[in-house]
Image (cartoon, grey):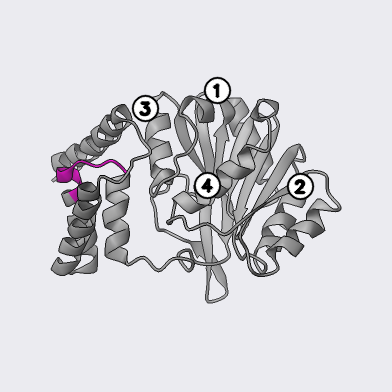
Amino acid sequence: MRFLIIIPAHNEEENLPFTLDSLQQQSFKDFRTVVVNDGSTDGTEDVIRKYTDHDSRFATVNLQKSAHQPGSKVVNAFKNGLKTQNINEFDVICKFDADIILPGNYLETVETAFKDNSRYGLIGGLLYVEKDGQWIYEGNSNKHHVRGPMKAYRKECFVQMGGVRETLGWDNIDSILLTNLGWKEIVLPELHVKLIKVKGADYTIRPADYYGRYFYFLGLNRFLAYIASSKEAAKSKSISFFFDIIKAYETCKKEKLELKISKDEQKVINGQRWKILKKKWLKM
């Protein structure tokens, strides 16, 4: 199998060398990497050039700084990198972040998993962060969901689900859509991926606005959005946080902001959320 790896990068001068070094050190060698320099103002472009000048497996695309919101920004960069390549020449399409360190057997293990099960559509490892000098499991998501920094899609799955969506929540939408199409999302817990820095530094959006917009662009109906908002408010132990999230969600609905998913896909997403709710209610 041949891998196509797209890495969006914005001001990643300090982190990117770790990511690209970990790719060069992979036991599996048949890959092509496109690093998308998304309007960086630091030395990211120079870092990329050190690899493209000496390793033909690395290429780059330079973009002007975009005003995209969280989620859509990274997917926009990803798509710009993707369109420079003929995906028919590849078997696996990867979206990696520019601040991760992959174990040396990462690509080899992912390839083996894809070959062993033809229904595997999306594969990834587990994210680890450094704390007090030790690398520990990040724990921000369940261990059955492939996180955004390390997505590896079987090409047929990627094409069938229409690629990734240029919107907030893209890395949950993909999971729901591919599962609905009969593909499987698999996390390989033995693959420990190191996340060098915490996300969110490039954006100033308030948490309540983030969740409100997230639930809207995920396509959730009003009832499910309110349920999801109550969960986030409970975590924060703040009633006002609930109303702030709802306000942001309702503002999006009032303004009729464009969704990047179809009506049918919205039904699939809401249906999946209903199933999760019903399972939880039955356990109560």
Residue under the point 39% across and 53% down: 141
Position of residue 94 relative to residue 119, above or below, is below
Residue 138 place in picture, x, y as percent: 46, 61
In the image: residue 218, left or right of residue 18: left
Residue furthest to the bottom in view is 132
In the image: residue 36, left or right of residue 164: right
In three-dimensional space, the C-alpha distance between marks 1 and 4, rounded to whole angstroms, equals 29 Å
Mark 3 — residue?
Answer: 180
Q: Which structural element holds mark 2?
A: strand
Q: In front: mark 2 or mark 1?
A: 2
Q: In front: mark 3 or mark 4?
A: 4
**On the image, which quarter does residue 212 sit in?**
bottom left
Quarter of the figure with the N terminus: top right
Marked residue nearer the N-terminal end (3 or 4): 4
* Span of residues in magenta: 218-225
The numbered dot on residue 118 is 1
Q: Which of the two residues, 12 or 80, is positioned nearer the viewer here?
A: 80
In three-dimensional space, the C-alpha distance between marks 3 and 1, rounded to whole angstroms, equals 16 Å
In three-dimensional space, the C-alpha distance between marks 2 and 1, rounded to whole angstroms, equals 28 Å
The numbered dot on residue 58 is 2
Residue 44 place in picture, x, y as percent: 69, 64
**Within-10-Å neighbours for mark 1: few <14, some 14–19, many 20+:** few
Marked residue nearer the N-terminal end (1 or 4): 4
In three-dimensional space, the C-alpha distance between marks 2 and 4, rounded to whole angstroms, equals 20 Å
Could you tell me the amino acid type at mark 2?
A: Phe
Marked residue nearer the N-terminal end (3 or 1): 1
Q: In front: mark 1 or mark 4?
A: 4
Q: Which structural element holds mark 1?
A: loop
Mark 4 — residue?
Answer: 76
